[in-house]
Image (cartoon, rainbow, N blue to C red):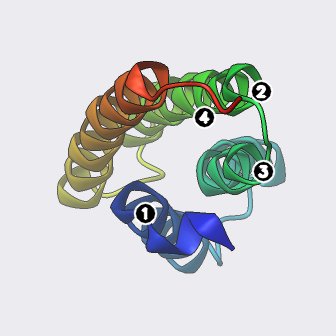
Amino acid sequence: MKCERLEVWRVSARLAADVYRQLADLRDFGFKDQITRAALSIPSNIAEGMEKESKREQLRFLEIAKGSAAEFATQTWIGIDIGYIPKETGKDWIQRSYQLLGMLTNLSKTIKAKPSAS
């Protein structure tokens, strides 16, 4: 897969795995389902987008991944506030989600700048 060569995919996949491990014993299944889906959506959409042939499709999936990163950061803030996520863990996740947002923006710019295939 093309995505495996991308640092943004590797960072997001590690984050999703960390979220699953950290929240494995959380009994609020609604919250756990929502935040783990958001985390998993980031690398999944990067992977799906990078397998598309058209720049337009690639960019669309990267935008979805960005939305998922923002959703994940919001849910993490809430998780910290209600005591589901330890403060240090949550702050690390939020910092990583902001890092991913920047990386996704940069990847989108790179794709936009590439000449289209003839």
What is the CA distance from the residue labelled 1 to the residue labelled 2? Answer: 17 Å
What is the CA distance from the residue labelled 4 to the residue labelled 3? Answer: 10 Å
User: What residue is shown with label 2?
Assistant: 57
Say which amino acid is labelled 4: Ala
Q: Which mark is residue 47?
A: none
User: What residue is shown with label 1?
Assistant: 6
Residue 42 image point, x, y percent: 60, 46
Of callouts 4 and 3, the N-terminal one: 3
Q: Tell me which residue sits at (74%, 41%) in the image.
A: 34
User: What residue is shown with label 3?
Assistant: 48
Say which amino acid is labelled 2: Glu
Badge 3: how crowded within 10 Å, few (<14), some, or many (20+)?
Answer: some
Q: Residue furthest front?
A: 118
Q: Tell me which residue sits at (59%, 31%) in the image.
A: 62
Badge 2: how crowded within 10 Å, few (<14), some, or many (20+)?
Answer: some
Which is more foreground, mark 4 or mark 2?
2
What is the CA distance from the residue labelled 2 to the residue labelled 3? Answer: 9 Å
Count of numbered circles on the image = 4
Of callouts 4 and 1, the N-terminal one: 1
89 to 1, vertically: above or below? above
Q: Tell me which residue sits at (82%, 43%) in the image.
A: 30
Describe the element under mark 3 as helix, strand or loop: helix
